[in-house]
Amino acid sequence: MLSLQHTRRNFLRSSVGLAGLTLPTFFKAQAVSTPKHRKAKACIVIYTWGGMSHYESFDPKPEAPVDIRGEFKPINTATPGIQFSEHIPLISKHSNKLAIVRSVHHNNGAHSGAVYLNLTGHQPEGQIKAKGRKNWPSITSVISHFHRPLAGIPNAIRMPYSMYDNGRQMAGESAGWLGAKYDPILMRTPAGEPYGGVSRYDDPALNLKLNLDKKRISDRLTLLEQLDHSLGQRLGASTAYEKLDHYRQMAADMLLGSPVREAYNLEKEDHRIRDMYGDHIGGQSLLLARRLVEAGVPVVQAVCSAGDLAGGGGDNWDTHRNHFPKMKNRLLPVFDRAVSALLTDLEMRGMLDETLVVFLTDFGRTPKINANGGRDHHPGVYSLAFAGGGINGGQVYGASDRNGIEPASGACTPADIHATVFKAMGINHNAELHDQLDRPYRICDGKPLPIA
Amino acid sequence: MIRLLLFLVLISNQTLGQTADQSAIESIKKNGGLVLPSPGGDNRWEVQFQLRGRNLNDAGLKDVAKLKNLIELNLRDTKITSAGLTHLKGLVNLTRLHLERTNVDDTGIVHLKGLTKLRYLNLYNTKITDKALEHLADLKNLEQLYVWQTDVTTVGIENLKKKLPSLTIIKGIDLSTVVPVKKEEPKPEHDLKWLPDGGNEKPPEKSITGEFTIIRFVNKRNKAVKLFWIDYGGKPKLYGIIDPGAERRQNTYEDAVWMIADEQEMPLGYFVTGREFARAIIPK
């Protein structure tokens, strides 16, 4: 648990301002003479469910005592002065596209609260229920509210699974008080070796592989419309009914040949591109994300992990046991290949400057390695990253202390990360949105980080 | 008085401009184009054809050409050709132009010479060569140029870079160099213990989840067997049939219970998985 003192100290640090600029940031700031104010048109959220260790990814601590720094070594990246952990060698070649934030922190050590906080940008209040309409909307829902797609294209898509902790679905992935219209549609990634462990499909997932011919779909729709008409007259329109209607219309639009259906067919992609992303659901999900963005979907969330944390078993980032072998053999290779492929692909297609890629996770992992060779939950400090969408790459914002325990400079919160995303997407982070009862809410309490 | 007249002339000019824009916008929309106001206001436009307007052809570009204050234009995946690009000549305010994945070749690029405000030009997966790049040498504001999947060579790129040193040219990767991930199938390290049905050693009642692993079933019986996974609630779930003498590779998790039954679904025995890749030999 964090003591009050720590929190206060962090608060003081966060108000230091310029101290948040590390050396590489400082040089970068000097080098860029004409800041580009281009705004992103689409956003891809990559979520490493369970809490990705900052030590073994973007914030290695080679100076720390051996029982803290762990087994992995740091490696140089394409950016002088920035090092990553050794098992993301492909991503490290893209450091010039990445803005790493090493000073995010919060005080919520439980997955349920942490995923809610990282996806909505707000602290959970009272009992939060999965898909609850009193919840704050997910960042994907808020983005899609401001970046509306063409008719027939979903507002937001998430894949390949919903996030669960031991059978309990997490709150934070839905639109909350913004209403069902902005709930991201859950989509099954149609290819790739699945993550080991437990993944659940209790939510209705959209599976476009259905091989119905268009004529039959239209026939069924006509029939449904007639039914609806008579039903509607008898029942009157209810909210639940409208919600159902929204989903059905969307599913129908997609089945009947919107660009989304085409995007979903990964068989149409060059097989070498598919190989580049890796024949794993982690890689194929990010490939699908790119194809969906091309098809006009404004925001896509990909969970790069098994769906259920299942007590730390399986391929998720909740590495309480066997942390090092699991990171090295199961988690990082898929993540490394998938993410570097996405950045390469977006860049060579000329999509990177208009597509914001943001990496989110629950929290970091403890400095101490436990008796099971694992690292436990550590919200005291952790690392996140941004790429594309007008973000200046090749920089690190903020720093953790020598042992990676708490922020040493530039302390910031998930709310600040959200403000940064909103700014990059051309959304005023102080904007007000209204819930179903027309009550106003300010979407974000944070401040954008100066990384764009 | 003169001031007032001047004012009226200005107003009417602007109104005329807007009406012309409106009729062009209507035509663009008919062709499936999406017209968005571009940031910066004052009738600045962005037009996209790549989603709903992929049937756009060269004739359709005439309507686009009427929108003089066009800032961004996306023609990705449309049916336009080099000949159609002549209509873009007057669009001198364009800063961003997408021509990727079209039939455009070197002969079309010459029409872009006067578009000196261009900052972004996307030509990936077109038929252009180094010759096209020569026509771009006067685009002093060009910052990003995309030439992946074209016949543009490093020589052509170097030559253009000499004239436009601040230009970033993205050639992308050569896809023939992509090496698929080699999946090294681990070798089975040991055999799982066969627990015959009704024997002394009972299997657990249900599977518990653990780390991912693989088992290879080998059926040494002279009859086919049915393979069931005992789920987390203790219920058997049919996974398939293994023919006599056949093998089956099965993804599973540590601490899973697998039941082998005969074709009448009478249990023969069980395997309980461990963490390592193992063989599960179904005895004669």
Image (tube, coloured by chain):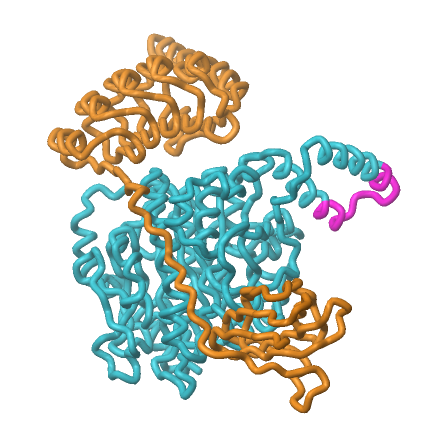
Chain colours: A cyan, B orange
> Which of the pair B51/B153 is nearer the observer?
B153
Q: What stretch of residues is rendered in magenta?
A: A230-244
> Which of the pair B109/A379 is nearer the observer?
B109
> Which of the pair A59/A450 is nearer the observer?
A59
Q: Is residue B102 above or below residue A430?
A: above
Please indicate whether residue B164 sits to the left or right of residue A151 in the image.
left
Q: Residue furthest left?
A: B162
The answer to whether residue A234 is magenta is yes
Q: Residue furthest right?
A: A234
Quarter of the image where one finds residue B61: top left
The residue sitting at 47% across, 20% down in the picture is B56
Residue A416 seen: no
Main SS, magenta region, reads helix
Q: Position of residue A246 (x, y in %)?
A: 68, 43
> Which of the pair B3/A301 is nearer the observer?
A301
Q: Is residue A31 above or below residue B278?
A: above
The residue sitting at 29% across, 32% down in the picture is B120
Q: Position of residue A287 (x, y in %)?
A: 44, 48
Which image quadrant: the C terminus of chain B?
A: bottom right
